[in-house]
Amino acid sequence: MPILVPPSEQYKASFLDAVREAQATGSGLGDTLTWNVEEAEADFGPLLAALCRFEPPAELPAGYVHAEYRWLVEGDTYLGRVSLRHTLNDRLREFGGHIGYEIRPGARGQGHGKRILALALDRARELGLPRVLVTCDVDNLASRGVIEANGGGLEGEFEVPQYHDKPIRRYWITL
Ligand SMILES: CC(C)(COP(=O)(O)OP(=O)(O)OC[C@H]1O[C@@H](n2cnc3c(N)ncnc32)[C@H](O)[C@@H]1OP(=O)(O)O)[C@@H](O)C(=O)NCCC(=O)NCCS
C-alpha cells in the first residue's frame, strides 16, 4: 500500500524520473514542470530544502502560510505528491485551498489520486483542522473525481481572474 513520507534522498531517482515524465507530457503542477532536472540530479539538497521551506517553525516570506509537502511512495517508487497548507490566506481562500496534489503521469487512473487526498485528510485531522478547502479547474474531471470520492461538498463554481485563467470549483471536506 502506498504511504506518505517526507521528501528524501531515498526517492531521488524515482522522483526525477517522474519529473522527466511530467515535463515530457506537459502534465503536472507548475513547479513540477519547471524543476531543473539536471541541477537536481547533480545536487538534490536544494530541491529538498525548497520543499520544506514552509514547514513550521520556518519563518515565512510575506504572503505565505505554513505548509508541508509529502510524497506518495511504494517501496522506493515515487508516485505523486501533496502539499497541505496549515491555514488559508485571502488568496488560498479564493484559489488553491488547503490541499494540492498530483500523481505522476504513468501512475494515474489506479486510485492513487483518491488515496493521496485521503492520506492528506488524515494528516489534516492530526493537525486539528475542522474542515479543508480543495479547489480544482471545472474541466479537471479526474481531480473532481478525487475530491468527490473523499466527501467534498461543492461550494460552487467561480471565476477568479486575478489568480487563474480558468473557472474553478471549490469544495469543502469536513474532517
Ligand atoms: C488529478 C489527479 C491527481 C488524479 O489522479 P489519479 O491517480 O488518476 O486519480 P484516481 O485514479 O484516484 O481517480 C479518481 C477518480 O477520478 C475520476 N477520474 C480519474 N481519471 C479520470 C479521467 N481521466 N476523466 C474523468 N474522470 C477521471 C474517476 O471518478 C476516479 O474514480 P474511479 O476510478 O473510482 O472511477 C491526476 O490526474 C493529476 O495528477 N493531474 C495533474 C495535476 C492535477 O490536476 N492536480 C489536481 C489539481 S486540483
Image (tube, rainbow, N blue to C red):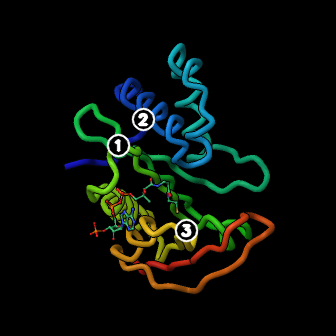
**Pointer 3: what residue?**
136
Q: Residue at x 78, y 70 (%)?
A: 161
Q: Mark 3 or 2 closer to N-term?
A: 2
Q: Quadrant of residue 40?
A: top right
- In the rendered view, would you say 76 is above or below 173? above
Q: Residue at x 58, y 86 (%)?
A: 156
For residue 148, side relative to residue 138 (left or right): left
Q: Residues within 10 Å of mark 2 (few under 14, many from 20)?
A: many
Q: Mark 1 or 2 closer to N-term?
A: 2
Q: Residues within 10 Å of mark 3 (few under 14, many from 20)?
A: many
The percent coordinates of residue 97 (x first, y second) are 59, 67
Q: Quadrant of residue 37?
A: top right
Gap in angstroms between the C-alphas marked 1 and 3: 21 Å
Q: Does the CB distance between marks 1 and 3 fall below 8 Å? A: no
The percent coordinates of residue 3 (x first, y second) are 28, 48
Q: Regarding mark 3 in the picture, which secondary structure is present there?
A: strand
Gap in angstroms between the C-alphas marked 3 and 2: 22 Å
- Labelled disc at residue 14: none
Q: Nearer the viewer, mark 1 or mark 3?
A: 1
Q: Regarding mark 2 in the picture, which secondary structure is present there?
A: helix
Amino acid residing under circle 3: Cys
Gap in angstroms between the C-alphas marked 1 and 2: 8 Å
